């Protein structure tokens, strides 16, 4: 039996879905991704996952994401430049009003610092609830979850400070609609299949 119930197929050519371009994306789509970078590897090992990052597509070729420099609006191509895997998902309950609220909230967080302690604690499902959210800071999956929650379309009952990129991917596979693979590198071999 696999470690997790909901595998993410990594390679579109190997039956893992289909490749898409950015024109297939809509505002408020969620992108889960990973790289070969050391930080990504640590996150994947620490969360027993194939993904290490989550971002929100906000339209017009841009994403909002919490990265080491803080919450940033970045060009999608720049955001995916080092990625070897990137998969997009969409809520079946999404409409323009909800998407606008998600994008508005996430965009308003630009400049807020990245929360290293919050990201580290998010994998401990007890400690993250005790400590609570880190004031005035975000990590990637927390930003995604909080934007959806604030827009009135919560992805789950889990507090946003207790969500890892793996949790986003698992919830995406269970509750969201697969949009497609933006990237799926043929030489990519995951550490774990979720």
Image (cartoon, grey):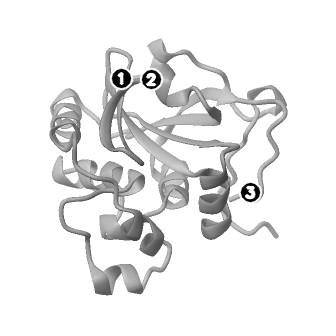
Residue 194 falls in image quadrant: bottom right
Give me the residue at 66% from left, 52% from top: 38
Residue 109 position, x and y percent, is 19, 44
| Residue in the foreground of this view, choosing between 117 and 158 | 117
The reply to whether callout 2 and callout 1 are in contact (CB within 8 Å) is yes
Q: Is residue 40 above or below residue 12?
A: below
Identify the residue position indicated by label 2 in the image: 76
| Residue in the foreground of this view, choosing between 69 and 181 | 69
- The earlier-in-sequence mark between 1 and 3 is 1
- The earlier-in-sequence mark between 3 and 2 is 2
Give me the residue at 50% from left, 61% from top: 167
Identify the residue position indicated by label 1 in the image: 62
- The earlier-in-sequence mark between 2 and 1 is 1
Residue 157 position, x and y percent, is 32, 68
Q: Distance between the Cα atoms at labels 1 and 3?
A: 29 Å
* Local crowd size for mark 3, using a 10 Å CA cut-off: few (<14), some (14–19), many (≥20): some
Q: Which mark lies nearer to you, 3 or 2?
A: 2
Identify the residue position indicated by label 3 in the image: 193
Q: Is 82 left or right of 105, judged from the image as shown? A: right
Q: Tell me the quarter of the image containing the N terminus.
A: bottom right
Q: Is residue 97 above or below residue 22?
A: below
Give me the residue at 41% from left, 86% from top: 126
Give me the residue at 57% from left, 26% from top: 81
Element assignment for label 1: strand
| Residue in the foreground of this view, choosing between 140 and 6 | 140
């Amino acid at each position: 039996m696999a470690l997790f119930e909901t595998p993410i197929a990594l390679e579109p050519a190997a039956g893992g879905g289909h490749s898409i371009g950015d024109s297939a994306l809509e505002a408020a789509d969620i992108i889960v991704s990973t790289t070969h970078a050391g930080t990504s590897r640590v996150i994947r090992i620490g969360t027993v996952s194939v993904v290490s990052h989550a971002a929100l597509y906000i339209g017009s070729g841009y994403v909002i994401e919490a990265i080491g420099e803080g919450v940033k609006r970045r060009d999608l191509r720049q955001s995916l430049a080092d990625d070897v895997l990137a998969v997009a998902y969409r809520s079946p309950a999404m409409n323009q009003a909800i998407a606008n609220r998600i994008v508005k909230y996430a965009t308003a967080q630009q400049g807020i610092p990245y929360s290293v302690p919050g990201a580290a604690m998010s994998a401990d499902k007890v400690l993250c609830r005790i400590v609570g959210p880190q004031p005035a800071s975000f990590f990637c999956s927390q930003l995604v979850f909080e934007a959806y929650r604030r827009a009135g379309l919560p992805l789950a009952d889990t507090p946003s400070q207790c969500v890892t990129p793996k949790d986003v991917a698992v919830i995406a596979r269970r509750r969201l609609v697969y949009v497609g693979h933006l990237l799926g590198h043929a030489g990519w071999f995951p550490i774990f299949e979720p």
